[in-house]
């Protein structure tokens, strides 16, 4: 009865505004959603995740990835279908005509002055304005490499959690402060980028160091690297539930998050199974023993990790997600020969895992947030007989994430993933600054050249469709 009433009210509004292509009778009696219908040129197959309803409330934005040169977007609240076609309507006191969308994201939809009270249709989303994102997992390195890559991250991100796996590792608050000073010197003079520092957990870390870290106002988390799991992890933890337990207990008291590289390092365990085994043998026992410990499972790569994070209590366990694990599967390592610039740790997984991660981040869940794991290496260190693990995504990360959400028909959920979920988990304020993503081709450079050599970015030489620019 309530649904019927909604139909009648909507149809009355449509008729009142002189929209004669769909009658009141059509809406109330014959309105339905057809799987083969088209909506202003957009195939309704893109709406396949929606349930069949006689009168279909739909999400705010849908994309058509096969359109050229850029996808068309449907700005609509309701669809009404008849036969093989559907008519879309924007319902917000008045009907809005097709015109340029000049704002979308944290703000309400804004239309330019050409909009009139007439029948709407599909419009093209030309730009997307969101709260400036943060990167909750970033490698900035040190020395010349730091000075080369820091400006790339600072140009798009307001803050970043900076990884401590240098040589030697950042194991003390004093070392973190010194490292932060080096980062600030590597930034452009006008930059407002704020590096959030981390400590490298070892078997020798003392609980008092956690107190110092919290009091410093500089250190925001502690990173757990199982010894030998990734780049510069040889000083990592070997006895988490023994030597490190007092430190973990102090972290609970100080509300200091533990950032976890979630892989076991037992050489007898298949490299593709190491995340799954880590969850069962380390992470689940850790959460059971210290349920109040805030844990971020970094750069998740499997449906097992997705399921684990979703099963945990909100606010205590979260996960960062990289662009490579959203866009690539393990085939990308071998297609056309060995591809060293697609090699990272944790290694890329099967397509079913990639799909599960995409579904999780585009679902609107607050437990998943942006963490690029951008990890630069000189070209000669990647293209060698023992290539380093790490993908350099910082210069194009926002364009890559936008690609994921765009193709999933979830561009309206991009802002929460990039800009809200991370600071909310860490208990930090959301940024007040904005950034705009414009619908414009972005050719990714083949390489970034510096005095010491070259760095190859993710998707080198390819063209992306979203281009960020700070407001």
Image (spheres, rainbow, N blue to C red):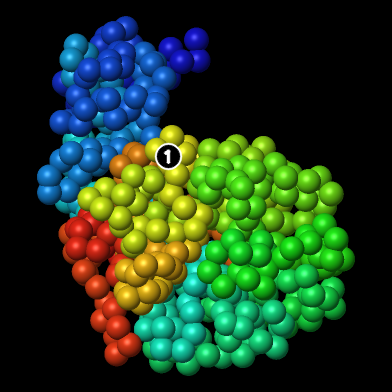
Q: Residue at x 27, y 59 (%)?
A: 459
x, y (%) of residue 209? 79, 79
Is 190 located above or below residue 43 in the figure?
below
Q: Residue at x 30, y 38 (%)?
A: 62
Q: Nearer the viewer, residue 186 or 190?
A: 186
Is 225 located above or below residue 84 in the figure?
below
Q: Residue extending furthest top?
A: 29
x, y (%) of residue 374? 44, 67
Is 168 located above or below residue 335 in the figure?
below
Q: Is residue 366 left or right of residue 35?
A: right
Residue that mark 1 sits on:
350
Q: Give the SS element for disc 1.
A: loop
x, y (%) of residue 223? 66, 67
Q: How many marks?
A: 1
Q: Residues within 10 Å of mark 1 (few under 14, many from 20)?
A: some
Q: Quadrant of residue 48?
A: top left
Q: Residue at x 81, y 65 (%)?
A: 244
Q: Is residue 296 left or right of residue 320?
A: right
Is 60 located above or below residue 138 in the figure?
above
Q: Nearer the viewer, residue 52 or 6?
A: 52
Q: Quadrant of residue 148?
A: bottom left
Q: Residue extending furthest left?
A: 68
The quarter in which the C terminus is drawn is: bottom left
Q: Nearer the viewer, residue 95 or 383?
A: 383
x, y (%) of residue 203? 78, 70
The reply to whether residue 46 is in sight is: yes
The reply to whether residue 104 is in sight is: no
Q: Is residue 294 left or right of residue 120?
A: right
Q: Is residue 457 left or right of residue 162?
A: left
Q: Nearer the viewer, residue 108 or 212?
A: 212
Q: Residue at x 22, y 38 (%)?
A: 64
């Amino acid at each position: 009865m309530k649904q019927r009433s909604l139909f009648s009210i909507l149809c009355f509004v449509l008729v009142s505004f002189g929209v004669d292509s769909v009658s009141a009778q059509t809406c109330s009696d014959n309105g339905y959603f057809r799987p083969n219908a088209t909506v202003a040129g957009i195939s309704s197959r893109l709406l396949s995740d929606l349930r069949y309803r006689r009168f279909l409330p739909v999400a705010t934005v849908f994309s058509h990835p096969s359109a050229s040169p850029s996808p068309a977007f449907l700005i609509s609240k309701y669809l009404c279908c008849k036969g093989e076609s559907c008519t879309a309507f924007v319902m917000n006191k008045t009907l809005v005509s097709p015109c340029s969308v000049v704002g979308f994201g944290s703000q309400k939809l804004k239309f330019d002055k050409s909009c009139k009270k007439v029948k709407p249709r599909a419009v093209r989303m030309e730009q997307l304005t969101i709260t400036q994102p943060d990167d909750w997992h970033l490698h900035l390195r040190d020395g010349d490499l730091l000075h080369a890559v820091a400006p790339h991250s600072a140009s798009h991100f307001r803050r970043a959690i900076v990884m401590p796996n240098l040589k030697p590792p950042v194991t003390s608050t004093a070392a973190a402060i010194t490292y932060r000073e080096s980062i600030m010197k590597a930034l452009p003079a006008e930059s407002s980028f704020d590096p959030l520092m981390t400590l490298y957990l070892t078997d020798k870390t003392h609980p008092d160091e956690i107190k110092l870290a919290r009091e410093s106002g500089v250190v925001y988390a502690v990173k757990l690297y199982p010894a030998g799991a990734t780049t510069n992890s040889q000083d990592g933890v070997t006895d988490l539930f023994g030597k490190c337990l007092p430190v973990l207990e102090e972290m609970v008291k100080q509300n200091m998050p533990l950032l976890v590289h979630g892989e076991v390092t037992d050489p007898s365990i298949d490299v593709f199974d190491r995340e799954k085994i880590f969850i069962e043998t380390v992470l689940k026992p850790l959460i059971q023993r210290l349920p109040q410990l805030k844990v971020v499972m970094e750069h998740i790569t499997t449906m097992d990790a997705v399921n684990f994070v979703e099963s945990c209590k909100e606010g205590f366990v979260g996960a960062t997600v990289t662009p490579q694990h959203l866009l690539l599967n393990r085939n990308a390592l071998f297609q056309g020969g060995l591809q060293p610039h697609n090699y990272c740790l944790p290694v890329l997984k099967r397509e079913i895992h990639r799909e599960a991660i995409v579904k999780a981040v585009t679902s609107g869940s607050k437990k998943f947030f942006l963490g690029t794991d951008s990890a630069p290496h000189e070209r000669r260190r990647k293209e060698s007989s023992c290539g380093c693990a790490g993908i350099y995504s910082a210069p194009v990360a926002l364009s890559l994430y936008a690609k994921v959400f765009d193709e999933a028909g979830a561009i309206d959920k991009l802002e929460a993933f990039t800009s809200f979920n991370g600071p909310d988990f860490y208990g930090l304020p959301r940024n007040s600054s904005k950034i705009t993503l414009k619908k414009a081709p972005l050719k990714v450079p083949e390489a970034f050249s510096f005095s010491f050599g070259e760095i190859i970015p993710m998707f080198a030489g390819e063209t992306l469709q979203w281009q960020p620019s700070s407001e």
